[in-house]
Image: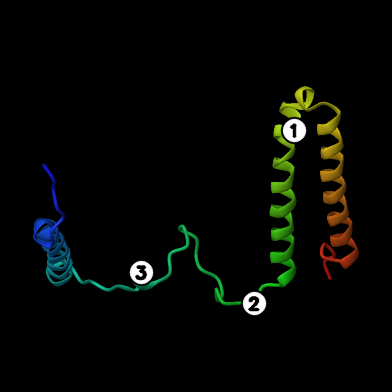
Amino acid sequence: MEVHSLPVNYLPIIFQMVIAMAFVVVVMFVTHKIGPNRKTKDKLTTFESGIEVVGNARTPISIKYFLVAILFVLFDVEVIFMYPWAVNFRELGNEGMIEMFIFMGTLLLGFIYVIKKGALDWD
């Protein structure tokens, strides 16, 4: 017995999808029209976790802040790679030790480069 996929076999699925999308559109429209529409000063103000908003959210922030944050994430993620090595320290032996020294040396070179570039200096 061989079953063929014909377009007519997909009609129930298409019909169900159309009905579901129509239901969503109708429900959103009806609730928007019959729901309460009371605009007060308190409802139109920006909500910041219960804290009164001070100033404009579009004030420029120093790029140093973002640079330090990205460097923190970068070096923090690199330290995560040391955990599996520490867990399997004995099984990896001398080869694992040499590879970790190469990894840590590369990480140290990157850190020295960041310091020499002055990325962590606040002016």
Distance from the alpha carbon under mark 3 to that under mark 2: 27 Å
Secondary structure found at label 2: loop
Q: Which residue is mark 1?
A: 85
What residue sits right under mark 3 in the picture? 42
Residue type, mark 1 in image: Trp
Q: Which residue is mark 2?
A: 60
Give the secondary structure at mark 1.
helix
Q: Secondary structure at mark 3?
A: helix
In the rendered image, the vertical position of residue 60 relative to residue 118, given as above or below = below
Mark 2, Cα crowd under 10 Å, few <14 / some 14-19 / many 20+, is: few
State how far apart marks 1 and 3 are (Cα): 55 Å
Alpha carbon separation for disc pair 2 and 1: 42 Å
Seen from the viewer's position, the closer of residues 12 and 106 is: 12
Callout 3 environment at 10 Å: few (<14), some (14 to 19), or many (20+)? few
Residue 79 position (above or below residue 84): below
Q: Nearer the viewer, residue 98 or 33?
A: 98
In the image, taking residue 60 as reference, residue 95 lies left or right, namely: right
